[in-house]
Image (cartoon, rainbow, N blue to C red):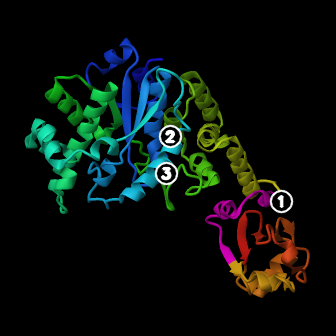
Amino acid sequence: MNFVEELRWRGMLHDIMPGTEELLNKGMVSGYIGFDPTADSLHVGSLAQIMSLIHFQRAGHKPFALVGGATGMVGDPSGKSQERNLLSEDALQHNLEGIKAQLEKFLDFNCGENSAQMVNNYDWFKNFTFLNFIRDVGKHITVNYMMAKDSVKNRIGGDTGMSFTEFTYQLVQGYDFYYLWKNHNCALQMGGSDQWGNIVTGTELIRRKDAGEAYAITTQLIKKADGSKFGKTEGGNIWLDPEKTSPYKFYQFWLNTSDADAKTYIRIFTLFGREAIESLETEHDIAPHLRVLQKALAKDITIRVHGEAEYEKAIKSSEFLFGNIGIEFLSELNDAEVIALFEGVPNFTISLSLMEPGVNVVDLLAAHTSVFPSKGEAKKMIQGGGTAINKVKISSVDEVYQVDNLINGKYLVAQKGKKNYFLIIAE
């Protein structure tokens, strides 16, 4: 497998330094990508870089994942309009542990010569004094060189300016590359296209400080076909941590991609080969309404991030809302999963004590909650046979619901028609 060709046909390649492909074709190369530890989880925006490392390792090379314990204290100005809040050492350590656990799901850290390796730049910066840094690193890179970078020019020309802390970021990241080149034989740094300036600062430092050679590859920044930002929803980032983004919501994110985006994403985010992808595309084009591409994409990524069991649960959750799975499915879910399943669905909280003697269904749906705007409308729709609780049609306006009717001792699911759901929470 040719790593650069793999990135190229998948539409991932953006820039490549001359000589890089020749180096990779000679034999095993060590290369790295840096990950930002500003949270204790990576999100789907990080997946493109994770996939780069996966392909790198599958091509027989040795991947290093650098978690920026030191650079996280500074903050990368690339693509940013203002300076970030700096994290404490304890917060960074917590974040690093979370990220490491996630990366171990994707990379093989025990496969012999090209086993993946994780490094933390705090380890080599913690005892590096400021005077030593400006003497050993700063003297090799001119201010003119640093000022020419777009990430610097854009900020200096903007309203907020740029702190000295952020200005020196490219030197700090450049030294990371130098350190890994010197101590781990890392000849290649990879990253998103917005990292090109920082990466080549590293290659330049290696050249000027030790007359060494190092190389760079950047990948395309992922955008939606409509130009909007990838990996964001109205609720914020789509995280890899199931506590932050439920596997059901994660699955739905991929399932709901447009046809144009699905054709791009299935190349970037899955491990399917070219023939398999082209076959899926042909099948999809014959019957787009079946969403063959989206289903294959969502299945592959959800299983690799969350496992087969969570994927199956996500499928059942979809079928519960849009198909024929019974109410007993909810008893398989914990509270967080139930709330995630009904995210975006109107929900109402009532007192558990209300349920103990029993509550009339009309009062429940029109007085204690607002499933219906009035008792009259509730009665009318119940008598018309268009209302259900816990997926059982309400047969009479005199029906009474008690604690025994609560799912997991806490929930009632009301429906108006087939698709209008309401979650009632008793607590």
Circle 1 Cα neighbour tier, 10 Å, few/some/many (<14 / 14–19 / ≥20): few
The residue that label 2 is drawn on is: 103
- Circle 3 packing at 10 Å, graded few (<14), some (14-19), many (20+), is many
Classify 152 as above or below 304.
below
SS assignment at label 3: loop
Could you tell which of marks 2 and 3 lies nearer the N-terminus? 3
Residue under label 1? 328
Residue visible at 91% across and 78% down?
Answer: 396
Residue that extends furthest to the top in the rendered view of this protein: 26
Query: How far is mark 2 from mark 1, CA to CA?
Result: 35 Å
Asked if one can make out residue 11 in the rendered structure from this viewpoint, the answer is yes
Spatial distance from mark 2 to mark 3, Cα to Cα? Answer: 10 Å
> Mark 3 or mark 1, which has the lower sequence index?
3
Q: Nearer the viewer, mark 3 or mark 1?
A: 3
Residue 16 seen from this side = no
| Residue 330 covered by magenta stretch | yes
Q: Is residue 73 above or below residue 113?
A: below
Mark 2 or 1: in front is 2
Q: Which of 422 and 288 is in front in this view?
A: 422
Specify the amino acid type for callout 1: Glu
Question: Residue 19: x and y, percent?
Answer: 27, 18
- Residue 174, percent across and down? 24, 38
Q: What element carries label 2?
A: helix
Q: Is mark 1 on a helix, strand or loop?
A: helix
Q: In this view, does 32 lie to the left or right of 132?
A: right
* Range drawn in magenta: 327-348
Characterize the local packing of mark 2: few (<14), some (14-19) or many (20 or more) Cα atoms within 10 angstroms. some
Q: What residue type is labelled 2?
A: Leu
- Is 107 magenta? The answer is no
Residue highlighted by disc 3:
41
